[in-house]
Image: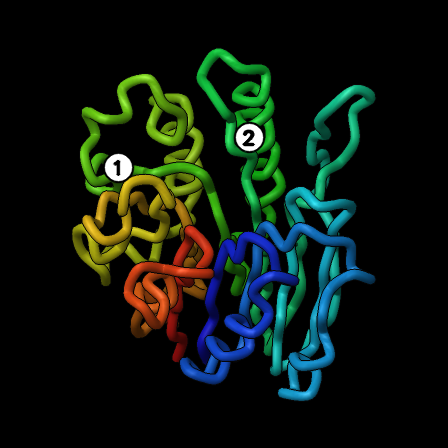
Amino acid sequence: MRIATWNVNSLRSRIDRVEAFLQRHDIDVLALQETKAREDQLPLMGLQSLGYDVAAAGVDQWNGVAVISRVGITDVTVGFDAMPGWGEPLAAEARAIGVTCGGVRVWSLYVPNGRKPDDPHYVYKLDWLGRLRDAAKAWLDEPVALVGDWNIAPTDEDVFDITRFAKSTHVTPPERAAFDGFLQDGWLDVVRPLVRGGEAFTYWDYYRQRFERNRGMRIDLVVASPPLARRVTGAFVDREERGGADGHGKGASDHAPVVVELA
């Protein structure tokens, strides 16, 4: 069984790439983030013709999450218990959807960016992660995957040059501590042990040939409960998808898909 996660940066803009990716890597379940559309706006006919079901959550042109599966979709849950909202007035954003596919519970997560360490969005990000952690403690004994764009680079190895991030989000001690909390509870980061160094990067800014120079970050993560982690047999980042046919990423998302293989 192959499970993948991908911040697609607009599903409507990249539906052809998504369909090709599913076939190229024989993907059973694909979690998407930043679909940037309501459910009724998503182009699903091609996916359905390929034998995939889709569960999605989206409210406007921002955020948005989905799961695409050819091994069934049941028990769809949009958002987790006590998930915080954002804005004035506070409103829940489309940042989390949980579904069961082939006996595996998959959560597609788009963690808030945080913007800057002194921004209210940063406080929202830490609150969001804390409440997710609280909810996830009840899921540890089942085969569950928390996958998606976590907007956290867990260690210095997960960025091309830590000195370039001195005043940035994604690498601050509170963000990393929030992620480490999941590991302390028993969740496992199942990709980093199998993919070393910069080969594990999943995000490269479009700015100044960051991809060509591999000046990236690893922020798209697959975190598994112990019962699911024991089934992991392999993992890789599809860097070809980020590079595109021309090698320069023309028309590509700024994130690459991450694929995990399960026994």
Mark 1 or mark 2, whichever is nearer to me: 1
Q: Considering the image in quadrants, where does the C terminus appear? A: bottom left
Q: Position of residue 84 (x, y in %)?
A: 70, 30
Residue 130 is tagged as 2
Q: Looking at the rendering, which quadrant does residue 13 occupy?
A: bottom right
Q: Looking at the rendering, which quadrant does residue 236 occupy?
A: bottom left
Residue 155 is tagged as 1
Q: Tell me if I can see residue 31 in this picture.
A: yes
What amino acid type should be assigned to the residue bearing mark 2?
Gly
Q: Nearer the viewer, residue 212 or 82?
A: 212
Q: Residue at x 47, y 43 (%)?
A: 150
Callout 2: helix, strand or loop? helix
Q: Is residue 188 left or right of residue 158?
A: right
Kindly indicate whether the residue at mark 2 contacts the one at mark 1 (C-beta within 8 angstroms): no
Residue 117 is tagged as none
What amino acid type should be assigned to the residue bearing mark 1?
Thr
Q: Position of residue 108 (x, y in %)?
A: 58, 55
Q: Is residue 235 left or right of residue 72?
A: left
Disc 1: CA contacts within 10 A as few (<14), some (14-19) or many (>=20): few
Q: Is residue 89 left or right of residue 109?
A: right
Q: Tell me if I can see residue 236 in this picture.
A: no
Q: Position of residue 60 (x, y in %)?
A: 76, 45
Q: Is residue 95 above or below residue 28?
A: above
Q: Looking at the rendering, which quadrant does residue 44 occupy?
A: bottom right
Q: Is residue 256 above or below residue 93?
A: below
Mark toward the start of the polypeptide (1 vs 2): 2
Q: Label 1 to label 2, Cα distance in Å?
A: 19 Å
> For the view shown, which residue lies furthest in the top direction?
118
Q: Is residue 66 left or right of residue 147?
A: right
Q: Residue at x 61, y 82 (%)?
A: 70
